[in-house]
Image (cartoon, grey):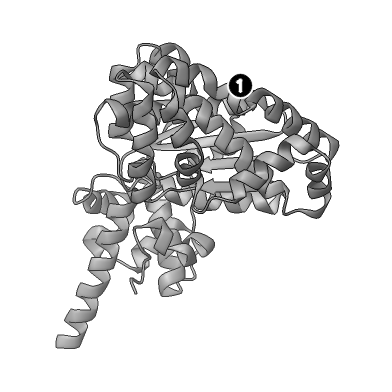
Amino acid sequence: MDPIGDGRAEHDQHMLDHAFYEWSDYKALLSDSTRYVVVGRRGTGKSALVYRLGQHWRNERKFCIEIAPNEEELIGFRSIAALFGQTVAMIRAGVKNLWKYALALQFVDSLSRYYKTSESIKQSSLLRDHLKKWQSHPGGPFSKLRRAHYDWLKSLDSPETRIGEIADRLELSSILKELIHILRQNAKSGVILVDRLDEGWHPDTVGIGVVDGLVYGTGEFREALSENITSLVFLRDNIFRSIQTYDNDFSRNIEPKVLRLHWDPQELMYMATARLRVALSVDKESEVKTWNSCTANELHGISGFRRCLRHTLYRPRDVIALLNSAFYQAQRQNALR
C-alpha cells in the first residue's frame, strides 16, 4: 500500500476521507450553481471531487446519484448512438433526449427506495410503469438504454424519425413533470454526478456526438429541475477540446457553464502536507512546518516544494507518486545503512 495514498481516487478512499484538501475549485462547485461541466487533465482530481462532493451532499441528506460507466457500457452504447446519423449535431440530438430519460429514471429509481417518496411513485401509473421496465434491464444506465430502446429505434426508417420519436415515445415531458411534483411534494432535492466518460471513448463522429449529447442532456435536465436537482459532468480536457472543435453552438451553450480545474503550487503543497500529516503522523499546525519536518534542508519551504514540482506536471497524481517514491527511497537507504 502506498503510504501517501493512491493517485487513483477509486483506490484512495482512506486519504480522501482523512486528508482531502478542500481547494478553491472544490469550494467553487459547492457555491456556484451555474457551472455544471468540470474539465481537467488526467490526474487533476476529477474522480476525487466526485467522491467528496457526493459525501458532502449525502451528509446534507440529499439524494446523490453517481454515474461512472465502464468501458464496455460506453462502447456498447455507441451502437444506439450510431442510429441517429453521421453528424455530431444529429447524434447529439438523439443522445440528448435518451440521456434526459435515463437521468430521470435513475432518479426515480433512487426515490423508489426511500419510503416516503416511494409511496408517491406508486400513486403515479406513468412513473410506476416506466420504472418497472427500467429496472427489468440489468446494468447501468447506458446498458439499460441500449437493451430497452435499440430495437424499436432501429425499426424506424430514418435518423430524423428516430430523433423526432424519442421524446414522445418515452413520454419524457410527462415524466419530468411527475418527478418535479414528487420532489416538491416531499421537499426533497438531489444531485447527479457523471464521471469517467473517457472510458472506451474514441475521437470519431460517434464518440464526440455521444459526449456532446450527454453534456447537453445533463444541462437541460438540470435546468428542467433546477429547484430540486443539480448535476455535474466531469470531462477530460482532450474530450472537451474535441467537442469545442466540432460543436458550432459550443461557445454560446456550453462554454459559460465550464469550470476548468487548476492547481497552483501553494494548493498542491497544502494537498501534500495534509497527506503527510496522516501518513507519517506529523503533529504540526503549519503546512510549511509539516513539509520541513519531512524534507531535507535544500527542500525546505515553498521554494523547496517548487523544486519538487519540477518533476511533475502540476497535478495531484504526480505529487502523490513523487512523494510515494521518495518515501520508498528513504526506506531503502535506511535499510542499507
Residue 243 is situated, as x and y percent measured from the top left of the image, at 33, 24
Q: Position of residue 266 (x, y in %)?
A: 38, 45
Is 321 positioned to the left or the right of 62 in the image? left
- Please state if 199 lies on the left or on the right of 23 as rendered: left
Where is residue 302 shown, x and y percent of the image?
33, 50
Comparing 162 with 34, the one in front is: 162
The residue labelled by disc 1 is 168
Is residue 94 among the parts visible in the rendering? yes
252 up-or-down from 140: above or below: above
Check the image and report above or below for 135 versus 284.
above
**Residue 236 found in image quarter:** top left
Q: Which residue lies furthest to the left in this view?
A: 336
| Of residues 138 and 318, the one drawn nearer to the viewer in this rendering | 138
Count numbered badges in the picture: 1
Horizontal side of 105 relative to 282 (left or right) equals right
* Residue under the image location 35 percent in, 11 percent down: 248
Label 1 Cα crowd, 10 Å radius (few <14 / some 14-19 / many 20+): few
Q: In which quarter of the image is residue 106?
A: top right
- Amino acid marked by disc 1: Asp
Please tell me which residue lies in front, 260 or 197: 197
Q: Of 233 and 287, which appears nearest the observer?
A: 233
The quadrant the C terminus occupies is bottom left
Q: Quadrant of the N terminus?
A: bottom left
Q: Where is residue 230 in the image (x, y as percent from the top left)?
A: 62, 34
* Label 1 residue SS: helix
